[in-house]
Amino acid sequence: MAKVSILMDITTDSGALTGLDGGWVEDGRVSLQNLMNDDVQAVARNTGIGILPAVFSIDLGRARPIAEVAFINHNSSKTAVFNLVISNSPDFSSLVYQSSANRFWQVTEVWGRRPFGQFPFDGIDIEAFPTMPISYLALGGLYVGRYIKVSIFEPDITAGGWQCGRFLAGVPFTPPINMTATSSVAVVDPSVRSRTRGGRRIVANRPRYRQFKLVLANQSKVAAMSTYHDFMARRGISGDMLVVWDQDDQAPIRNRMTIYGALPETAEIVANQNGTYSLTLQVEELL
């Protein structure tokens, strides 16, 4: 089965977020601090981006491990990129990790899915993305640092600025025994359908969202009673998470199988006869 990755403990939420350039808007629901808010429709917006990047930093308060970052519900163009720096110095003079020119958009189209002429030559069709854009970067290792700095470069300023609803960083969890058969992906359509007395169909459209069912069988006692138990006890249905169905999938599939969501309900952790534990996590997408 797939090599699922679940970011449950969002390290950056305990930090202090600061804008390092003058373009960040602080007006009503538009605030840089919205990057730490799970309401992804309340965005952070930078209207000064252009020749110079939009930059923000996060002081985690102490050195913390980081293995992946993600931007949720952003309006980046195909050409936008970001640089990421992790350091133990507030002036970022000594670097723990540095990565540059990371594209917000990876390939979204499977080659051969469309006929020639309709297929975008760069492989990116922003409009085809299933719900909201998620940019995800695995750092390729575990890096321990106190300070994070992100610089966003956006050559296309026709949107009037760059904005994003959520920024995440932390260390994801991969179950020691991966999810099993009967795990599933669903597109949920909460639209209301009715018919008039004359038989005409009427649909009150509502935004569709995705839902994962992760069947985790034969988990170790350590995983069951530390990772799963502690997450549900501390954060319950209010705690958000980033779930990547299979880290090894090709980009077009991985993009569609990555959701930012939360538990609609906590799950029972069931003791098995062989000394292992099982549970089923339902994760529904937040929009």
Image (spheres, helix red, strand yellow):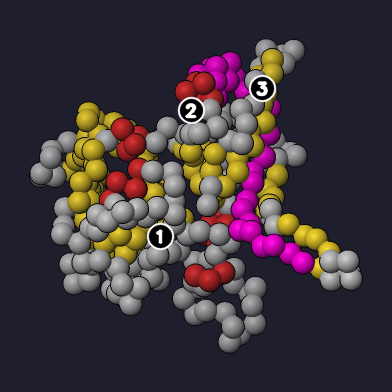
Q: Mark 1 is on which residue type?
A: His
| SS at circle 2 | helix
Instruction: Examine the rendered structure and indicate whether residue 227 appears above or below residue 102.
Output: above
Q: Which residue occupies the foreground of this view, 259 or 252?
A: 259
Residue occupying the point 59% across, 83% down: 118
Instruction: Find the magenta span and give its range.
Output: 202-229
Residue occupying the point 61% across, 58% down: 207
Residue 247: % across, % down: 52, 47
Q: Mark 3 is on which residue type?
A: Glu
In the picture as drawn, the residue positioned furthest to the right comes out as 198
Q: Which residue occupies the foreground of this view, 77 or 112?
A: 77
Instruction: Answer with left or right where residue 32 lies relative to residue 224.
Output: left
Residue 124: % across, % down: 49, 71
Q: Mark 2 is on which residue type?
A: Arg
Query: Is residue 47 one of those drawn in magenta?
Result: no
Badge 3 crowding class, 10 Å Cα cut-off, few under 14, some 14 to 19, many 20 or more, is: few
Badge 2 crowding class, 10 Å Cα cut-off, few under 14, some 14 to 19, many 20 or more, is: some
Query: Is residue 213 one of those drawn in magenta?
Result: yes
The residue that disc 1 covers is 74
Residue 22: % across, % down: 15, 59
Q: CA distance from mark 2 to mark 1?
A: 25 Å
The residue that disc 2 covers is 235
Q: Quadrant of residue 3?
A: top right
